[in-house]
Structure formats: C-alpha cells, structure tokens
Image (spheres, helix red, strand yellow):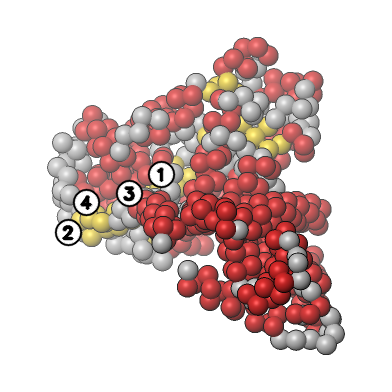
Amino acid sequence: MTTATEQVALDVQPVLARRDRLFVWTDLLIPLLCVVVVVSELFYLSQAPLDSIERDLVSNARIWEYTQQHILITIVIVVLVLAVAVPLGVLITRRGTAWIAPFVLGFGNVGQAAPIVGLIAIIGSFAVGFWPVVLIIAAFSILPVLRNTIVGIQQVDVGVKDAARGMGMSPRGILFGVELPLAVPIIAAGARTSLVLAVAVVPLGTDLNAGGLGRIVFPAIKLDRLEALVAGAVFIAVLALLIDWLGGIAQRLLTPRGIR
Amino acid sequence: MKSTTITGLAALGAGALLLSACGLSEDSGSTAEVEAGSVDPTALEGASLSVGSKDFDEQLLLGQLTIQTLSAAGADVTDDTNIQGSTATRKALLRGEIDVYYDYTGTGWITYLAHTENITDPQELYQNVAQEDLQENSLVWGEPAPFNNTYAMAVTQEFADENGLATLSDMATYMDENPDATVCVESEFAARPDGLPGMVKAYDMTIPESSIQSLGTGVIYQQIDDGECAFGEVFTTDGRMAALGLLPLEDDKGFFPLYNGAPIVQEENPEGDAILGVLAPLSETLTTEVMAGLNAEVSSEGLPVEDVAATYLQEEGFIK
C-alpha cells in the first residue's frame, strides 16, 4: 500500500500548487519540442541513404497509417479502463460493497504484474486482432486508475463530507457533487499513467494484427535496420509525450476551480 | 487485513509466472562429457569453447547438436544457446562471446550484409555471403548443410482439396477470384524483398492490404489450422507443419531463395578450422527431412532438445 500512496502523493503535488490562470505559455513547450523532433526526424529520413527495405518501412504513408492505428488503440484502451476502473473504485469506497476490494485489487495487481508478452502469447493462441489486444492491454494498465480512484475518494476531507451531509445532500449527491469532483486531479493522474503505459505497450500487439507503430519497430529489429528502428522508437516516444500532455490539459480543465 | 493476504497471493502467483518466464533462458553452463563415435576424440582436445544459437526450436537443436559433437571431439563446451534474436546472436559471435553457431545464408545476405536484391541459386548465395562476410567482418562460413529452411505459403489439406490448390500460381488465381481471403504473414516477411513484396511481384498476385494480417510466427500455424487464415507464411522445416497437417504450396516459379544453415566462426579463432572440420560430417547429414523430423520431435512432441540431439547423434554414430 505504501508505494501506491507515495506515487499518488507525487502525482498530486503539481496540482496542489495554485495557479491564477488556467494556461501559461510554458504549456506550449512540450508540443513545440515534439514538433521539432518529428520534423527533424522526417527531414533526416528524407536525406539519409536508406536502402529499399528501410525506405519501405518508414515511408510517410506507413508512418501516418501506423500512428493513426496506434492512437486509436490507445484511446479505446483508456476509455475502457476509465469505464471499468472508476465505477469499481467507487464501489470499493462504498460501505456496502467494500467487500469486493480484495478481488478487484487482486485482479488489477495480477494484470499489471503478469508478463505482458506472455499474456499476448497466451491470448494469441485463441484470438487475434484489435479487440483481444485492447482487452489485454486494458487489463495490464487498469491498476493506476483503480488505485487512484480509491485514494482520490478516500482523501476527501471528512469535514467537507460532514458539511455536505449537514446541508441535506443525499449520499448520491455527495458522491457526484463533492467526492468525485474533489478526486478528479488524482483520478486523472492515474489515467495519465495508464495512457503512457498503453502507448508504450501497444507495439507488442503487432504480433496479433492490432497494427500500430510496432509494425515499424519489430521488422526493423529483426532485419537489423537501425535507421528504421530509431524512427519507430522516436514516433512512439513523441506520441507518449503528446498524449501525456493532452492528459495534463484535460486534468486541469476537469479539476474544479476551487482546488485548482 | 484480508485484502493484503489476497493481494499477496495474487502477487505471488504473478511472481511465479515471471520466474518461470525468466527460467527459460537460464540454461547456460558446461556440458557433461560425451563419448566419441566416429568423431575424432582428440580433434579439439583441451579447447575451451562456447556454442551459441538463436531462440527458436531449430536453432536450439542445432546448438545442442554442435555442443555434443564438439564435446565428443574433446572440447570443454559452454552452452550459450538461446540468445534472443538473430542480430544479438551474430553480435555475440563478432565480440567473441561465442565461438560458433549455425546461421542461414539468406539471413546473412539480407539482414547482416544489408543487401536488398535476391539470389535464388543456393550455391551462388552461399559463395557470395561467405566471401563478403570474410572480407568485411573476418567471419568464416563453414560448408552449408543440405537442409533448406525457406519460406512457404501453407494451407490446410481440406482447403487445398476444396479449391484445388497445390502451387503458388494456384494461390494467385484463387486470390484474383477471392480477394477477401486472409493472408497471414509476419511483419518481417512483409518487409523483406525475398518475402511478401517479392512473391507478389513474381507471381503477379493481387492481395489487397485489408486481406493481409500481420501476426507473430508462433500464432500463424495455429491460425491456419483454425481456418482463420486461408494462407499463412511458414518455414519449411518447422515441426508444426507435420503436426498440424499443413500443406506448403509448391513454389512453382522457384521464387523463394533456398536458405541453408552453416556453422560460422571468427577467422582469428585458433580453433576455427578444427571446429568447422568436426562439424562438417554432421552438417552433411542434416537434410530438410531430417531437420523437419527433429524439429517436430521438439515442437510438437515436446521432447527435450538435448535428448533429441543426443539420440540423433548416436543413431548416426557420431557419438556413443
């Protein structure tokens, strides 16, 4: 439990620093950096002496197609993770359904601890394609959102909840009007961790016909084409950075003004 | 505190999974003495050698065959087989971490020597690879074994019977009539000039992008058998072909290059010539049928590689 609490504490800190304005110009540094990196990599590829295998692997059409696939899988995974983990996390914090905690957390822990390559190999002998890969990676990246939902709701000040009850709010009203809004920064921090995990793991789904930038990376490794390998890795890293950046913006927008 | 117990149990279970996954590659170590049969027991007396291999069944088998043969020739052999991937194995040889391993002429040409044009004659391919690798990297390729491990497109027997498929030309005709038929390939095969792009050109096939599925090697065999893939890329010596009763389509235009396996050593290795000399008679016996049979014993019957190798070497009289 300690590690989860520490992780949450780390994630929350920047949020607690109060801001006067929602956005500042430094917010643009990350996307700017990404643009510079992508443009230089594409320029480099257009200049570099590539052989026909490499040129084929990192053609603009392919990079674009695989990036779109990569983004689509990542988004579906994260939507799925949020749709499952947040309600489960809420149920764990309700007195009547707290008994599900060991089962749900056990599942989340196994999901994250199990070797993902092994999971993909096992599932791959039964089913291949987009959805099997989405389900495996969702199971793999569910834990951060689950844990942060629980911790986010539990850390809501008892006095605040008492005040809400004193005002005559129903338990349901307290959950949606007080607890969840106050937990948003922490839940969103978990979702960002899940997003980055998903972007990084999606390439492993290449072997199950799920598409994504792994289709550049893996042939490049097997055929020992370093330029293509670096290009694939750079695009995955940029995608992770950008998606985490977007997550940060969303986190800020969703956080209630009072605790921003 | 019930939750911690169950979380703990779950973590233990996952830990055990992790451990067993790691355990697979931890088989490095010296091997026991092997008594020589027809192998000269003094050829490598006193030499201390390390044998490598890549990480799939055929390579593990070649590794064990090499280890036991070199041990019989008097060498003290360390087992460094099961290295992850072709490039890593090759680099281990270049750095001198291993003394010898079997690689394929086609992999040498396309992957290591970074050529993109195809050589279809096996002997010409071997000579080109051996010559260029010696000049550029000081590596010596021993005489290649006769077995051909090459690509093929495979189908199930039933599917072949129903549609009268026997050759890749038949496949081209079938694809023209049924463009939706799934063609399953590895992402590597899809990128190699001696793979899918070349095959499509040589047979004038039309395979729409949407019909191509990119799968891992291990998955393809099962998916063909399950009928999920109409056509699938396979290796001709793979043991699962026989086990699942898959039919490789005949390469009637002779497009796929024939890849022979050959042992490789460093030129500066003082034992290099002796190693290749000891392995040459073994290589000669390794035909496509022999390799497919041995591979099947490992991949489908699940016998230990060491035992399959030892039994074969005893039957052939190399060791006792």
Quarter of the image where one finds residue A153: bottom right
Residue picked out by circle 4 = B31
Taking the image as shown, residue A42 lies to the left or right of residue B218, namely: right
Taking the image as shown, residue A25 lies to the left or right of residue B23, namely: right
Q: Earlier in the sequence, mark 4 or mark 2?
A: 4
Q: Earlier in the sequence, mark 1 or mark 4?
A: 4
Q: For the residue labelled by badge 3, is the local secondary structure a helix, a strand or a loop?
A: helix
Residue picked out by circle 3 = B276
Tell me which amino acid carries mark 4.
Answer: Thr
Tell me which amino acid carries mark 1.
Answer: Gln
Residue picked out by circle 1 = B59
Task: Determine whether label 1 and label 4 are within 8 Å by CB.
Answer: no
Tell me which amino acid carries mark 2.
Answer: Gly
Residue picked out by circle 2 = B46
Task: Return the x and y of residue B98 as percentages of the image width and height.
Answer: 35, 59
Task: Determine whether label 1 and label 3 are within 8 Å by CB.
Answer: no
Q: Residue A35 or A165: which is nearer the viewer? A: A165
Instruction: Work out how far the residue at label 1 is from the one at label 3, CA to CA, in angstroms.
Output: 17 Å
Q: Earlier in the sequence, mark 2 or mark 3?
A: 2
Instruction: Work out how far the residue at label 2 is from the one at label 3, CA to CA, in angstroms.
Output: 17 Å
Mark 2 surroundings within 10 Å by alpha-carbon count, few (fewer than 14), some (14 through 19), many (20 or more): few
Against B202, residue A246 (above or below) is: below
Against B288, residue A132 (above or below) is: below
Disc ID at residue B91:
none
**Label 2 is found on which chain of the structure?**
B
| Residue at (28% x, 41% y) in the render | B306
Question: From the viewer's perspective, is the residue at label 4 or at label 2 nearer?
Answer: 4
Q: Earlier in the sequence, mark 1 or mark 3?
A: 1
Against A190, residue B2 (above or below) is: above
Task: Return the x and y of residue B128 as percentages of the image width and height.
Answer: 54, 49
Mark 3 surroundings within 10 Å by alpha-carbon count, few (fewer than 14), some (14 through 19), many (20 or more): many
Q: For the residue labelled by badge 1, is the local secondary structure a helix, a strand or a loop?
A: helix
